[in-house]
Amino acid sequence: MAFIDSSVVNVALPAIQADLAITVGGAQWVANAYLLMLGSLILVGGSAGDRFGRRRVFALGIAIFTAASISCGLAPNIGALVAARAVQGVGGALLVPGSLAIISAAFPADERGKAIGTWAGFSALTTAAGPVLGGWLVDALSWRAIFFINAPIALLTLALAFRHVPGSRGTSDGRDVDWVGGVLVTLGLAGLVYGLTAAPDSGWTDPLVLGGIIGGVLIIALFVRHEAATPLPIMPLELFRSEVFSGANAMTLLLYFALGGAMFFLPFNLIQIQGYSATLAGAAFLPFTLIMGMTSQWSGGLVGRYGARKPLTIGPIIAAAGFALFAVPGSDASYWTTFFPAMAVLGLGMAVSVAPLTTTIMGAVEERYAGTASGINNAVSRVAGMLAIALLGALANGVFGSTLDAHMTRMQVPAEIRVALDAEVPKLAEAKVPPQVVGEQRRALEEELKQAFVQSFRVVMLVAAGLALTSALCAFLTVGPHGKTTR
C-alpha cells in the first residue's frame, strides 16, 4: 500500500495540478504533507511497534492509511486533499517500519539478508505495478480513483496479518512512547518544509518564510536535546555511536534526496513536456522498478558474499550515472534512446544499493531496537525525499525563471506579456502563454517555456547525480573494509 501510493501519486500530480488549478508549490504539498507525517512520525511508529506489539501497530496503521486514502479520493479542494494526505502519512508511519521489523525479528541473522531482499523485491514489484495502474486510472477515470484502490488491498492485508504474521515486540517494560519527541520533530520539519516550499512564491526574505526555516531549525535542535535527556527516546542517540549505523543513514539521506527529487519532477517532464499520457508515463517507470524487483533478492545476499562496502559504494555510482543520463533528453526526445537507458541504469544502481543498505542498518543494532532502527532509516529516507522536493523545487523554479527571462530578453517580448509569463513561473511545466498571444509568436513562446523547464530539469538531475556520488563516498569512508555489520 505505502509503496504503491508513493509511486502512483507522483504520476497523478500533473493531473491534480491541472484539475485543481494549483502551482507547483501546491503539488509539492500534496507530496510533502504525506512525507512530512511519514518521515517524522515513523520514529514513533517504529518505537510503538517495539513496545506495544509490531503486528498490532502494523494493523492500526493500515486502518488509518485506508480511511485517509478514501478521504483523499473525496477531497473537494487542495486544502482537504493536503489534510487527508497528512493523515495518510500518519498511517504510513505506523505500518512501514512494522513490516520490516517483523521480518527482522522473525529471521535469524544468516537468513535476514535474503528475507529483506525478498521484502524489497515485492515492494519493488508493487511499485512497478502502481504507476501503470494509476496512470490508467487517471486517464480512464480520474486522479481520485488512485486513492480508492487502497481499500481492497487493505482488507486482504489485514486478513493475512492476523492469520500469518507472528506477534513480536522489542522492549516490554510497558512504559509510554516518546510522544513529545514525535511532536517536536513534526513541528520542526513542518516549519522547515513550509519555509522552503513557500520561498519561490513569497521570496526568501518574507517573514513567514524566514520564520518557518529558522523556527524549524530551532525546534529540531530542541528535539535532539530532548532525545538526549529523555529515558525513552524515539531516536536513541546512542545508536549513532556506531560508525556503520551513522554512515549508512548519512548515505540514505544523500541517495534518497537525489531519488526523491528526480522522481517528483520526472512525471511533469514526461506528461507536460514530452506529451505522454498518464498511462504511458507510468509505464515509463517499469525498467526502473522491474530491475529492482528482479534483482533485489540477489542483491540481498551481496553483503554476505562481498561485505557491505563494495555494493554500497558501487551502487550509488551506477545510480549517479542514471541521474546524469536523465539530463540528456530535450523537449522532443525518443523514450528508447533517452529515458529508457536512464531508467535502467538508475534501477540497477538502486538495486545494488537498497537491500545491502537495509541489511547494514538492521545488522548494526541489537534485535530489541529493530523497529526503532527501521523507523530511523525510513524516517531519514522520507525526510530526504521531502527536503528534496522543497529544495530542488526552489532550485528548479529559480532556473526556470532565469532561463525564461533570458529567452524573453533575446526575443524582445513586450513588457505586458513578460509580466504575464513571469506570473506563470511558479507553475513550471504547467505554465501557459497568455491567451492574447497568437500565431507564430505564441508557438515560439510555448517552445521557450518547454526549453526553460528542460533546463531546470537538467540542473535538478545533475544535482541528483552529484549527491549520489557523495553518498558513495560516504559509504566508502564509514563502512568497514570488510563490510562488517556487527552490533
Image: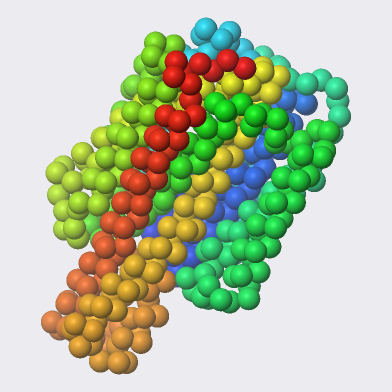
User: Which residue is at the front of the view, 182 or 68?
Assistant: 182
Q: Is residue 5 above or below residue 455?
A: above
Image side of residue 382 versus residue 169, left or right: left
**Relative to 202, 236 lies left or right:** right
Frontmost residue, 52 versus 227: 227
How many numbered dots are placed on residues in this image? 0
Q: Residue at x 35, y 85 (%)?
A: 420
**Whole-percent x and y of residue 92?**
60, 39
- Please tell me which residue is depicted at 62% across the width and 35% down the height of the picture: 376
Q: Quadrant of residue 129?
A: top left
Residue 8 percent location from the top left of the image = 43, 45
Residue 197 x %, y %: 52, 64
The residue at 23%/45% (across/down) is: 325
Q: Quadrant of the C terminus?
A: top right
Name the residue rendered at 40%, 35% in the picture: 473
Q: Position of residue 7 (x, y in %)?
A: 43, 43
How is the structure coloured here? rainbow
